[in-house]
Image (cartoon, rainbow, N blue to C red):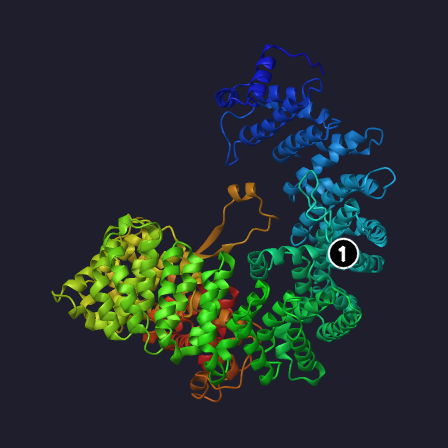
Amino acid sequence: MENVVDQDQQWLLNCLTATLDTNHEVRSFAEASLYQASSQPGFGCALTKVAVNKELQLGLRQLAAVLLKQFIKKHWDEDEDIFEHPVVPNEEKIVIRKLLLLSLDDPHAKICTAIGMAVASIAYFDWPEDWAEFLPFLLKLISCQTNMCGVRGAVKCLNLLSDDLNDKSVPVLVPALFPCLYTIISSPQTYDSNLRTKSLSIVHSCISVLGDMSGVFKDETNSLMASMLKPWAEQFSIILQAPVHFEDPEDWSIRMEVLKCLMQFVQNFPSHIEEEFSVIEAPLWQTLVSSLKVYEISSIQGSNDPYMENYDSEGEEKSLEALVIQLLEFLLTLVGSSRFVKVIGKNAKELAYYTIAFMQMTEQQVHMWSMDANQYVADEDDGTYNCRVSGALLLEELVSSCEEGMDAILEAAQKRFTESQLDKAAGSAVWWRMREAVIFALSSVSEALAEISGSPRFSCGNLLEQMLTEDIGTGVHEYPFLHARAFSAVAKFSSLISHRALEQFLYAAIKAISLDVPAPVKVGACQALSQLLPEADKGIFQPHVMDLLSSLMDLLKHASYETLHLILETLQAAVRAGHEGIVTMESIISPMMLNIWAARVSDPFISIDVLEVLEAIKDAPGCIQPLVSRVLPSIGPILEKPQQQPEGVVAGSLDLITMLLKNAPIDIVKAVHSVCFNLVIQIILQSDDHGELQNATECLAAFVLGGKQEMLAWGADSGFTMRSLLDAASRLLDPGLESSGSLFVGSYILQLILHYPIQMAQHIQDLVAALIRRLQSSQTAGLRSSLLLIFARLVHMSVPNVEQFIDLLIRLSAEGYDNSLAYVMSEWTKQQGEIQGSYQIKVTTTALAMLLSTRHAELAKIHVRGHLIRSTAGITTRSKAKLAPDQWTVMLLPAKILALLADMLIEIQEQDLVGDDEDSDWEEVRGRDDDIDKDLLYSAGGTSYGRPTVEHLDAIAKVFNENRDDTDEDDLLQRADPLNEINLAKYIADFLVNFSGTDRTLFNHLCEVTSLVSTRVLCFEILQFTSVT
């Protein structure tokens, strides 16, 4: 290659140099010039020549290579989303590819990486179809031990490309490349650790893609695995066999990649790796045991780990903690695999024993959390990814998947507890860390412990009580984190600890809040109180309620952002537990809460916490009147001039009003109405802020629910209130309004229909037309679902004249469809499977059944989307998705409705995992004829012809009523609807039986045209069911 610099090259060099100039104008002009030049022929080739010219300055070459990579992404392939014209001509592509390949052996690491990135970008587009020489060239480069720079460049290039490998490239790559990579990985005397690590990373990526392919190309992938796994397993065992050493990040990195590869084998090719696992088992255990020794000395006991958060030049972490996390994650994968859990199970006690040790606090964590309580709270709440969290997840999986898991953990905990006692007696300064880790470990499996606590085999209450009692009795200033862990764990073990002990912990937590103790202790005390107070004996707590509330109020004055949430959560629990006694503190708590709310109203997390405290105060006897009297004078002026308020204040104020209205007595609703109702209406009519519109809509729905018919008489004009409500609905249903602003209009209109049926009846046609226009303009699935719910509720309201509602839809037009009925049913049947919520599912499902029962002639003329036609052509890549988007069958509307009803029953059955002994409404169905032997629900899956059990349908009822006690806003609003009391399982079963019995011919026809196997099976069972009756 000639490195002659011509006039054009010199111009490019000058421009590149100018982009590094400190003068902003010079730099900007150069950048603009380069951008203009990028659209000229030969620009990519010119950049390449600069990047590969070893006689030029290193910085300019690196800059040219980076710009070249960007140029390739924008101009190489016209099908890319970020493509910019013009496309690089084929002749120029050939030159660029050749020049770059020849320069992969550049001795400068940064240049080699930059060129490798450019080559990988081109290979992503061109290989293997349009760049046949790519792989042979790299294989030749990798195999040449006399050109180590070339080996490094080729491996680096393939490593960069490995993230973009797919089912087309990997089968070509693996047979040719893996022998070369094996040579590198198995030759530590020739190749350094970094090169071997990068080679293993490529192996990992290829195995991952082969795993994705194994479902479709099972024989091909199995053939590849069978021929190569044995030597690789042997090599993995060699790498893992040697003990983990101190201060050797290169060794840690290569072990990490081995563990990642093994994880892919276990997840995707378990039968193959199972045959070779005996070779890996002992070395894996050696890595676990030896890494713990190093981790304890360098991280847990060491004051400073020099390799903490250490990264290589490509950004890959090379720390000991990263290795341990990867190791624990791999062990978790083994435990979760039915093939390997028995192998791990025989060493479950040892595994639990070592895992608990890994869960100790490190010296860095102790230092960081002692200095910054905010970080401690954040890490505790978020479950920051570290060895402690990884260990907890492993123990959870051990309990879940391994029969001996709980025994192993309890025995290991007892053993570690004893060791910590001995260390304490010996005068160790860090004895408490193992004790804290034991409590943390047991807390991670507390739910499982609670479930089996009645079994003598797992009697651990005494151990827990002994540990926690001892720890609370230690010096709070000497061992703050032990105290914090003990407090936070108490609530998790409440069912295992004696009532007397729980009272002692509750009192200790209340006392800790008021004392001058380290911040982590107060954090733990708050965590304990927030969980224990809701279940605490009110008689025991009442004498302390005032002191606790005063202490929490003092904490609030000095709270930081992270601790504020925890203190507010504890305050809410204290207010609800105090209940009758709160009225004497309301004048102190409410003003402070309102001040915090005003200061944090734009913060959705804190403002919600404050609202929950205020709601607890509102619900306390004697508190709602004074609270409302404090709020209204301040809220009114805000809503009168919404445009003048800081961001978030209006939306937050509307939330506050909605909270006050919820479950409020009628006199409170009227008082809030007199100040706020007209202002809320005006916000809906005038605001374009989505948050304000959403909250105002919810507020109006709460007004309607709380005020009901009485609210219509509160205005000076008897019709003014109703007109205002309809004006608001009209604005929210405006198709020109963005979907986000109308998000809660469905819930609002639902309240209008339920509480003002007479007034709304005269507007039904206009309402339906507006709903259709809004539905057609909606871009949000949530909004479409809520609008379809209104259509479903209107179907119910039209009973017994459902045909008239269908005729109304037929008369109304819908753009792109024959009529509104065709459009609404097309959207409805498409969206039904995505509708969420017990109430929503009940209303829409039963409404579909009502429509089908009319046998209206127009229904049979409508074709809707059926089921997805699944492709069998392998992995769906981006290019495949563009060329072949999802395709769906088409089916008649009545058949689709029948399929949806069948799907609903099948889905309920699948959720019926655990029955109970209580009777259900299904007894009514069973009692009609003792000779009916067919199980409508269970047979829908084609697995049995047994009789439906009481437990079956009772569990079904629970599925759709389990959230009835939630305090969710929508749930509270919808409880007013009697349709919420429907037993959906019984309703569908009765409907299908009656429908098949009254029109067997139509039912038979729908069964025939329904293409879904599950629906046909269900239809067959219904026919059998009705034939018996």
Residue 426 at what x, y percent from top left?
Answer: 80, 70
Instruction: Identify the residue shown where x is 18% and y is 67%.
Output: 759
- Tell me the quadrant of the picture where the N terminus can be found: top right
| Rendered position, 953 above or below 433 | below
**Which residue is outermost to the left?**
717
Q: Residue furthest top?
A: 7
Visible residue check, residue 749: no
Residue sitting at x 65%, y 26%: 62
Above-or-below relation of 750 to 207? below
Residue type, numbered disc 1: Tyr
Q: Say if residue 441 shows up in the picture.
A: yes
Q: Secondary structure at mark 1?
A: helix
Direction from residue 891 to residue 209 in the image, left or right: right
In the orientation shown, which residue stands out farthest toward the right? 189
The image quadrant that residue 1003 belongs to is bottom left
Residue 137 against residue 302 in the figure, above or below: above
Q: Quadrant of residue 629?
A: bottom left
Count of numbered marks: 1
Q: Residue 197, located in which quarter of the rendered image?
A: top right
Residue 854's spot in the image, x, y percent?
31, 70
* Residue 179 point in image, percent of width and height: 81, 41
Which is nearer the eye, 623 or 190?
A: 623
- Residue toward you, 51 or 211: 51
Residue 391 at x, y percent in the picture: 69, 62
Residue located 71% across and 54% down the image: 326
Q: Relative to the observer, which residue lies in front, 518 or 80?
A: 518
Badge 1 is on which residue?
Answer: 295
322 relative position to 757: left or right = right
Residue 419 in the figure: left or right of residue 329: right
Q: Looking at the figure, which quarter contains the C terminus?
A: bottom left
Dot 1, how many residues are within 10 Å of its Cα: few (below 14), some (14-19), or many (20+)? Answer: many
